[in-house]
Every structure is written in C-alpha cells, then in structure tokens.
Image (tube, helix red, strand yellow):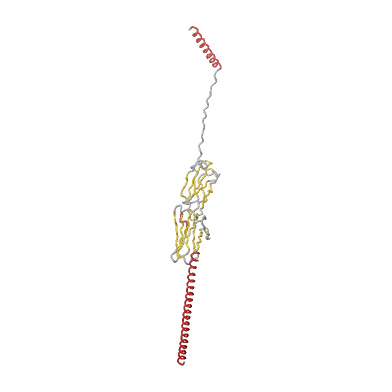
C-alpha cells in the first residue's frame, strides 16, 4: 500500500510536472506569435509610410508635368514702350517691333530661345539667352511679313519645352509721304524760283531721297529736273522754258524700299520764251461767169448736131 501510494504520488507528481511543462511551452509559443505579430505590424507601418512617400513624389511629378511654365508673348516699339500681348492671328505695326517671350514660373528654366520664321521667303531670325526671358528686334527682316513665332526653353534637368504662335503679321516698314507746297496752282513764275515740298516717314531712322519733275502739258508727260536729292527744295530757272499756263510739278520720294509722289493741285504759268505765232494761209478759187450767148450757142450746136446725125442715119437706111 505504501508502495502504491508512493507510486501514485510519484506518478501524480510526474503528471503535475508534465502539465506545468506543457503550460510553459504554450506561453513560449504565444510570446513568439506576439513577437511575430508585432514585427508584421511594424513592417506594415513601414511599408505604408514608404508607399505614402512614393505617392507624394509621384503626385509632385504629375503636378509639374500637368502645369508646365506658361509662355507670355508681348511686343513694344520705338513709338510706345508699353508691352502688349501677342496672340495667333494678330497684326502688329510699329517702328522696330521688338518681341519679348517670358516663361513663368522660371525657377527651373536654364535657357530661353525665340525664332521668328517668315515662311513665305523663307527667312528666320532668332535670339537666345540664359534665364526665362528673351527678346528680338524684328526689323532685322528688312520687310513686312506674316510669321510663325517659336519659343523653346531648356530646363536644368536637360528637358525642353516648345510653343508655337502662328500667323502673326509684323509691319515694321511704312510708305513715305510727300506733299507739294509750291507751286501748287495758279502761280505766275518767271526767272528762278524755289520748288518746295514737305515729306515724312513713320520709320524714324529712314533717309528720304527725292526726284523733281515738271510737266508743260498739265501732267500728260514729265521732264526730270533733278534726282537723288535729300533737300526739300529745288531752285528752278524757268527762263529757258516756253511761256505756258499748263505747267505742273511732281515730287517723288523714296526711303530705299517704298516710294510715293505728289503733283501740283492745279496748273500754273511759267517760262519766258514766247511761243511763235502760227499763220494760216487760205487759198480762194474763183470761177468766172460764162456769157449767156455762149451758153445759147453751145445749146444750138448740140441740138443741130443731133438733128443732122438723125437725118444722115435715116437717109442711109433708106438708100440701102
């Protein structure tokens, strides 16, 4: 009995020891699971932060791609320094049309270029400089053209962006104007007199040259008096010209590209040589009257001749 009690006790003690060992192993497993769960949670949090950061970078990149720098094209002239916006299809006029392109924002722009292409010629002028802005004087074309304007920018990262503005007319050059002052009609000139006129050009730095002509037949034909002049007067000695009342003068002006002219408003009298008079000789043919007796004689002669001819004809027919 003692032996069995011990054995049972021992066996019970073993049982109790085995139960305790099992409990400890469960605790170890539970702790391990908790540690794994914590590690997984930390990993998920870290991945979430990395993903959020990546998304933030992507959003910034997309924002930059969707909203690139905007181009503003303007112009000003020697007449007016105020910058005016330019759009496709505009017609610009002025002395020295200067185009300006500015890209905004410009913090990431390294260099800017503008090209102006007169496609009909074709001719291209261009300008380029560092930064987000550049300008060009389009008078360098030497004429008036409809153009395509092209602007390109280079970013610091090496990428580029280009924008075109088509169908822009650039009118830098204007026709000079001339106006005859004297003689302008109904004057009477002898000897030497000054022919005078006014002239102007909307292009401030143009040098104007003139030709002076005179007509003696109210403008039907002209005779050149002087050419290549830069003065606005000419001394004309009309003493060697016929004295007529049908003179007009014409002044022609040129700026080297365009030209125009003006004529006296009405004829004037000038010249000292008198025109020789012309005489007309009339020849009159007179017919003398014929004596009525002669007329009677001729009449009787014709009638008698006819009668004799008739008698001779009749007698010859009878005798034959």
73 up-or-down from 263: above or below:
below
Q: Which residue ends up furthest to the bottom in the rendered image?
A: 2
- Closer to us: 282 or 192: 282
56 up-or-down from 178: above or below:
below
- Closer to us: 59 or 253: 59
The image shows residue 200 at horizontal and vertical percentages of 51, 52
Image quarter for residue 296?
A: top right
21 up-or-down from 142: above or below:
below
The image shows residue 246 at horizontal and vertical percentages of 53, 41
The image shows residue 317 at horizontal and vertical percentages of 49, 9
- Closer to us: 45 or 62: 45
Q: Which residue ends up furthest to the top in the rendered image?
A: 319
Q: Total marks drawn?
A: 0
- Closer to us: 197 or 37: 37
Q: Which residue ends up furthest to the front in the rendered image?
A: 1
The image shows residue 24 at horizontal and vertical percentages of 47, 84
260 up-or-down from 39: above or below:
above
């Amino acid at each position: 009995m003692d032996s069995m009690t011990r054995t049972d006790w021992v066996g019970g003690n073993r049982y109790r020891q085995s139960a305790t060992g099992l409990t400890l192993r469960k605790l170890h497993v539970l702790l391990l699971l908790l540690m794994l769960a914590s590690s997984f949670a930390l990993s998920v949090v870290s991945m979430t932060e990395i993903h959020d950061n990546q998304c933030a970078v992507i959003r910034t990149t997309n924002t930059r791609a969707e909203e690139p720098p905007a181009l503003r094209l303007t112009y000003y002239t020697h007449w007016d320094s105020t910058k005016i916006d330019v759009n496709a299809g505009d017609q610009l006029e002025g002395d020295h049309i200067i185009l300006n392109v500015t890209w905004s924002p410009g913090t990431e722009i390294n260099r800017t270029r503008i090209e102006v292409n007169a496609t009909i010629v074709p001719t291209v002028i261009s300008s380029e400089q560092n930064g987000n802005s550049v300008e060009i004087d389009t008078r360098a074309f030497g004429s008036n053209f409809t153009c395509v304007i092209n602007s390109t920018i280079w970013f610091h990262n090496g990428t580029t962006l280009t924008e075109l503005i088509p169908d822009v007319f650039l009118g830098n050059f204007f026709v000079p104007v001339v106006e005859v002052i004297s003689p302008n009609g109904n004057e009477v000139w002898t000897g030497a007199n000054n022919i005078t006129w006014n002239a102007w050009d909307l292009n401030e730095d143009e040098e104007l040259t003139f030709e002076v002509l005179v007509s003696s037949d109210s403008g039907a034909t002209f005779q050149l008096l002087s050419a290549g002049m830069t003065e606005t007067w000419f001394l004309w000695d009309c003493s060697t010209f016929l004295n007529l009342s049908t003179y007009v003068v014409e002044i022609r002006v040129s700026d080297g590209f365009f030209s125009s002219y003006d004529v006296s408003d009405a004829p004037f009298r000038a010249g000292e040589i008198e025109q020789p008079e012309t005489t007309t000789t009339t020849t009159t043919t007179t017919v003398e009257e014929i004596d009525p007796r002669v007329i009677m004689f001729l009449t009787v002669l014709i009638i008698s001749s006819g009668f004799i001819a008739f008698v001779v004809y009749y007698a010859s027919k009878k005798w034959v």
